[in-house]
Image (tube, rainbow, N blue to C red):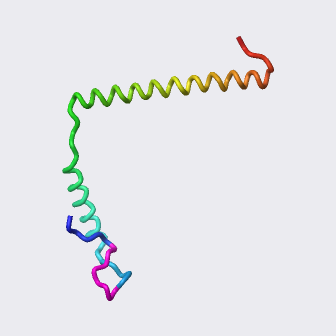
Amino acid sequence: MTEIAAGSSNNPQDPGKGDRRGILAGIALFLRQVASELKKVVTPTKRDWFSYTLWVLGFVAVVMVIVSALDFLFGQASIFVFTNQLEQ
């Protein structure tokens, strides 16, 4: 894009002053840039959605197993430390 970002200065004799755009001009620039970025978005196919869903469910299952194992181990360790015996 060729727009100048708000706050940049084109005048070398006036450093630090920047572009004095109004708030509405800044919002308009932002919205134009958002629209430009949204044109680059590619919608996944059904096959991609299915694949992504399986990956997420698999990852969640693995994390559940890890958290459950840690919960069990820390539970057993705390029982051992505070009662000096393992619960069976």
Q: Where residue 28 sits: x, y (%)?
A: 24, 65
- Please say if 50 is above or below 20: above
In this view, which residue lies farthest toward the bottom? 13
- Please say if 1 is above or below 18: above
In the image, is residue 65 part of the stretch drawn in magenta?
A: no
Q: In which quarter of the image is the N terminus?
A: bottom left
Tell me the residue at 19%/50% (across/down). 39
Q: Quadrant of the C terminus?
A: top right
- The region drawn magenta spans 7-14
Tell me the residue at 61%/25% (across/down). 71
In the image, is residue 9 part of the stretch drawn in magenta?
A: yes
Q: In this view, does 23 lie to the left or right of 42?
A: right
Q: Where residue 57 sits: x, y (%)?
A: 39, 26
Tell me the residue at 34%/25% (across/down). 54
Q: Where residue 68 sits: x, y (%)?
A: 56, 23
Q: Main secondary structure of the magenta part?
A: loop
Q: Where residue 11 sits: x, y (%)?
A: 29, 84
Among the 4 quarters of the image, the one containing residue 13: bottom left
Q: Is residue 53 left or right of residue 81?
A: left
- Please say if 42 is above or below 11: above
Q: Is residue 41 left or right of residue 23?
A: left
In this view, which residue lies farthest toward the right? 84
Among the 4 quarters of the image, the one containing residue 30: bottom left
